[in-house]
């Protein structure tokens, strides 16, 4: 039996954005306190965490003090530098662990890992230089996507190629960073499944949701996704296989393409995920709480959905629509406390609960 | 049109217990920051508020600094000293306002106010001394309750009299504090209605819930309460009449007795209320968020219930049952981060969502 952190224990969260903020709120519901570590000034999670450390990722003294002040460490983003983890892991457990982070930080490692598990992905090939890219455009077939191996998010670090003569421009757009070329897939929909694995190895999953994107950024998630029962089961099975293979502890977000040949894994994020925000208003345990439960050794709880729901991100000036949304039937508003509504910046989201008939 | 506080504005909360804690979390959902003022060490709300002032209620310097650091002030308990309010109100608005606090702080004032509104209450009489009590026992009829005019909660400051010869003991139990004698009512159930009034004067109410008590402390609230549609409407109408008469801004909790002659008002609390905790898992806007919306000038939003639910308080050692509850279907656990589980202490609550068939 895994040991459960007692009430009042302190959870360290690396990263103080909106995910850290909502993790901190979920932790408070379970009687835990939070200490957020973020290099930026006034991060959103700092408003709701008991403690905030503002320091750089390479400040080993600050990392050491942070690690000594908490009982477990988790993170809201997958690009935590390895050296920072080295400092922290010497002192206190990091959950999810190193394997999950290292696998998801690099698209090549991630795709190789998924293939070895027997899970379908887009065809992919390592691209080290422009000659390799030009060659791959021939061998591989177009259209295809050139993606940086590391640090991509919200469509950044990607270029779409439809003709071989775009190779030079595409290579320039990623500034010569190590890449993979990924074959374009004929998919009818993107769905994602948010799943969790507890400290004792038990797994559970929320219902899959249907995602739509605008300009490479998630726009909406509709739940339930229009999947057959077999497809929904397959989505859960895929998430479970990834969780078990990584000896994972916490919540994972797995993005899947629906294709005529079955579900293919696009990518996974070793953390709570934007496409799981709908759980806040349709489940008794939401993705944030499921994550906190997992990393503290608590049972995962009941992840069953009890209402249909659609999540919509509020990006940039969308936030100006909040006064109207705040009076709309069934709409729950979630704002992140960010002062400035820059274009492309995630300012909040709304969950529209669609009551059962 | 009332002015809406912008995102990032700071809400001052007087009192840092579990109600202040859950208000702070709700404020964060709407992008607001919180500053909690509490005389006690390590209050639960301090874990989730951006700022915490630990100072006495008569520390006018601390109150002044607190008031200058926030955009609006609210409170989690009705016994805020008048002198503290004087300091704060000179600087920043307090919502709900003075009338609500002063009316609810004194049972005589409260009952007189309700009677003038034409709302039914138990018969009551002012008791200033033991002679008055002895006389009232004759005139009034027994059983009856001797209740202190001020500072009663969770059944404290009350004595039940069934025979005139208990008058001396009852008077001793309240230590000679100013009291009222309240006639016992033949009621079939206690229900409560949580209602809200916005800055522009609009009102809305959650569905009434059925309350059960153990040892004078709320134990469960079941929603919907077993009321006829007419009774439920009447409960909302009563709450609305109180809100309008007090020119109220925020959430109110109104306890009602169901009697053969209709609904009688037991008492009201000018704040979020324990019997409204169920709203966290059955409405898109819960009582805490409705309160924050009201005091910040936002629209109240959708208070319609979308699931049946039963709230159960975790009192004292009940909290030892959390591991089992945390795995129970439909159960959402809410803990307050209190270190020590003393008898009678509210440690948390659970909401069991009863899915619709």
Image (tube, coloured by chain):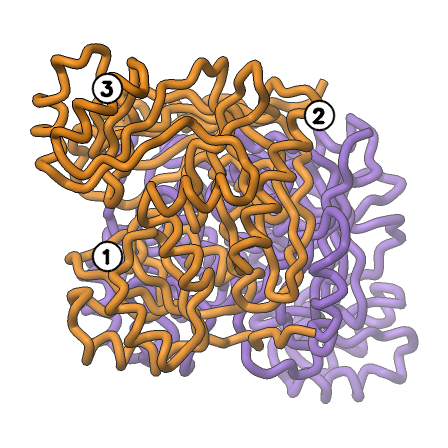
Chain colours: A orange, B purple
Q: Mark 3 points at which residue?
A: A137
Return the chain for callout 1.
B
Q: Which of marks 3 and 1 is in front?
A: 3
Disc assigned to residue B70: 1
Residue A2 visible in the displayed image: yes
**Residue B87, placed above or below residue B295:** below
Same chain under badges 3 and 2? The reply is yes
Return the chain for callout 2.
A
Disc assigned to residue B5: none
Residue A88, quarter of picture: bottom left
Disc assigned to residue A230: 2
B109 relative to B290 in the view: left or right: right
The image shows residue B290 at horizontal and vertical percentages of: 48, 41
Looking at the figure, which quarter contains the C terminus of chain B? top right
Q: How would you rate the neighbour count of disc 2 (Cα within 10 Å): few for under 14, some for 14-19, many for 20 or more?
A: few
Secondary element at image label 2: helix
């Amino acid at each position: 039996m895994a040991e459960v952190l007692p009430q009042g224990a302190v959870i360290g969260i690396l990263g103080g954005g909106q995910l850290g903020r909502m993790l901190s709120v979920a932790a408070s519901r379970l009687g835990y306190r939070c200490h957020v570590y973020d290099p930026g000034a006034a991060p959103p999670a700092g408003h709701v965490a008991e403690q905030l450390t503002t320091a750089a990722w390479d400040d080993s003294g600050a990392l050491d003090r942070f690690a000594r002040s908490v009982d477990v460490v988790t993170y809201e983003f997958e690009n935590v530098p390895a050296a920072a983890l080295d400092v922290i892991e010497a002192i206190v457990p990091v959950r999810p662990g190193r394997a999950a982070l290292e696998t998801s930080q690099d698209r090549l490692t991630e795709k190789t890992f998924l293939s070895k598990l027997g899970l379908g992905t887009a065809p992919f090939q390592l691209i080290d230089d422009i000659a390799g890219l030009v060659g791959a455009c021939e061998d591989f077939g177009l259209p295809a996507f050139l993606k940086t191996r590391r640090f991509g998010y919200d469509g950044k670090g990607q270029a779409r190629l439809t003709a071989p003569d775009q190779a030079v421009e595409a290579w320039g757009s990623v500034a010569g960073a190590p890449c993979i070329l990924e074959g374009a897939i004929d998919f009818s929909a993107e769905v994602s499944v948010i799943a969790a694995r507890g400290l004792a190895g038990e797994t559970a999953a929320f219902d899959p949701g249907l995602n739509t994107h605008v300009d490479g950024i998630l726009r909406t998630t509709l739940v339930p996704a229009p999947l057959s029962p077999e497809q929904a089961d397959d989505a859960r099975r895929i998430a479970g296989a990834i969780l078990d293979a990584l000896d994972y502890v916490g919540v994972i977000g797995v993005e899947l393409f629906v294709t005529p040949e079955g579900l293919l894994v696009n990518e996974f994020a070793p953390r709570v995920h934007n496409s799981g925000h709908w759980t806040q208003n349709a489940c008794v345990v939401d993705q944030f709480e499921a994550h906190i439960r997992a990393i503290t050794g608590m049972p995962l709880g009941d992840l069953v959905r009890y209402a249909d729901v659609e999540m919509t991100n509020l990006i940039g000036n969308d936030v100006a629509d909040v006064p109207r949304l705040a009076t709309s039937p069934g709409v729950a508003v979630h704002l992140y406390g960010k002062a400035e509504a820059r274009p492309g910046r995630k300012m909040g989201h709304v969950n529209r609960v669609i009551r059962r008939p």
